Image (tube, grey):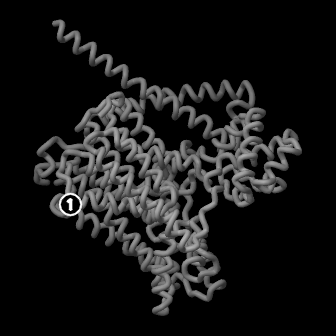
Amino acid sequence: MLTFKKGKMEKTSRKHSGKIWCHAAAILFAVFMILGQSFYESNSWARVFGSVSHLISGLIRGIFWYLLFYAGISLFFRFLDTGSFLSKPGTGQHKLRDNRYIARLGSIAGRYAGLIIRYPFRTVFLTLLILNIPYIIFSYPGIFMGDSATQIAQSVFHTTGLSNHHPVMHTLFLGACLSLGGMIGSWNFGAFLFCLLQTLLMFAVMAYGVKTLVEIQANRWAYLGVILYYIIHPRISAYLFLVSKDILYADFIVLFYIAFFRLIQNSVPKRKRDFLLMGVAVLGMIMARNDGIYVIVLTLLLGLLYKPFRKKAACYIALAVFTSAMLNQVLYPLMDVTPGSIREMLSVPFQQTARYVKYFEDDVTEEEKQVIDKVLDYDVLAESYDPDLSDAVKATYHGTNEDLAEYFGVWFEMLLRHPGVYIQATINNYYQYFYPGPTLFNNYSYEWSEEMMDGLNESFGSDYHFPEIWDTARETLEMVREDFFSMPVWSLLNKPAPYIWMAILFILYCFRRKSLLGFIFGMPMIVQMLIFITGPTNGYYCRYEYPMVIYLPVVYIFGLHLINSAQTRLSSDS
């Protein structure tokens, strides 16, 4: 009888401990909803703190959202507790005819699911390739955007020297593909080659993720759902042929996540190729995006806390740091590469200063104006200020390190006078990541791509163009896709906030389950979210969030597998 009571007390304690994180998540998301709506409507928190009536209204709405989210998050966490994403040991290879639900889908669907179990990698890879052939044809030779033109000018036409504002290795790889097309007399072929290679790599990475799900005996409905998600998602397909560093970076960070999981789990044997692929992912992330080093190092530093992975983490940290140092301190100086500007790291303070000048210019002293003007063009700050995008403000940067030191002194003094301005500037620049309002991910349209191509052709005599034969089909495909995924429910796939919410819920669930291993595995998501909220744009800019859009469904299942297979308390030292 005493044992029963003790067990009951322990169970109750765990239950109450878990509720804390449901409350925390519900409060957090309620705040996001109230502030997000205010900034969406007024670019400020005036709809919450502007008057007593607004404050009361905000509190009432906040309580409503809190109750709603608490109920929903509690149910969601309980669902995760059931382990429904994972099959019981030994059930992963059951014949499909034993499952009456799959049998009802018909013999074709059943055979396809059987192929996934028998040949997961090639089945998924070919599925994605075949179903995307129309998109590949219509998007030939590729979708160009602003950064594409800059990188092409540097690497193909050499109008300016290489700059590390865009990752040099990515620029050189793009230039090599395009130059090959130019050599054989087809600029289009060069662009198509680059886009095709990054697309095939993405399909391979996706297939490898599903193969891993099959190997850990995940619920077959889970990995079938992942495949369906990859097929129908409006931005995954629309960005495959985008000429941008973010797409190739997404390939490597998803590979990093899969290899990371395979090296820290204990359900399937680790193979030599897993160690090799982790190394390839580390090198690829560093070469494809300048901030890739932060995701790698911060994740693996935390990975040092997990004793079985400690030596491997140290080796990959050394590889990442050595590679980054060799590129930035040795190779790029030898190539006369212009270093990236420090302004790319200063979006937050620059936006805060610009908003201050716009709304409280009378409070800026002459001395402060002179100091700011050494770093930013003071006279145009107010008109350059865009609450959602810091590019126009950053473009006025012209300071030195000494000027920056003096600027931050003034920045701090202004912060003390009007802290609310700084807070609002930051929220205004990033609230779309957390508020699931009407904002949809941006789309690089075919029309916009044609304008970029025309600009390159006029400047350099190239001949990038979309084949006219597909004009009607191309425009129809894009119109149907954008209209369909603007509809209620379906539009959730096309908004930035749901992915951030799911990432936050995963982290809080790790705390709820007191899983150190799960928290370590969630670290890349945490680092990416920190990068989002220090970057130049609001959430509508999809290409920054693109890697998370791809890896999140697979990572969720991986993470739940780790949590369920190895319970490790956050307070324990591995």
At which x and y percent is residue 16? 36, 19
Of the pair 375 and 98, the residue shown nearer to us: 375
Can you tell which quarter of the image residue 127 is in? bottom left
Q: Is residue 56 left or right of residue 115?
A: right
Please determine whether, in this image, residue 83 is positioned above or below residue 208: above
Q: Quadrant of the C terminus?
A: top left
Q: Is residue 526 left or right of residue 533?
A: left
Please determine whether, in this image, residue 564 is positioned above or below residue 132: above
Please determine whether, in this image, residue 319 is positioned above or below residue 298: below
Q: Secondary structure at mark 1?
A: helix
Residue at left offset 25%, top offset 38%:
83
At which x and y percent is residue 149? 59, 74
**Given the current orientation, which residue lies at the most extreme bottom position?**
185
Q: Is residue 164 in sight in this rendering?
A: yes
Residue at left offset 69%, top offset 35%:
47
Q: Residues within 10 Å of mark 1 (few under 14, many from 20)?
A: many
Which residue is tagged 1? 116
At which x and y percent is residue 309? 28, 45
Q: Is residue 447 in sight in this rendering?
A: no
* Residue type (three-letter) at the residue carrying disc 1: Ile
At which x and y percent is residue 386? 71, 53
Of the pair 143 and 269, the residue shown nearer to us: 269
**Given the current orientation, which residue lies at the most extreme top position?**
2
Of the pair 376 and 407, the residue shown nearer to us: 407
Please determine whether, in this image, residue 569 is positioned above or below residue 169: above
Residue at left offset 22%, top offset 15%:
7
Q: Quadrant of the N terminus?
A: top left
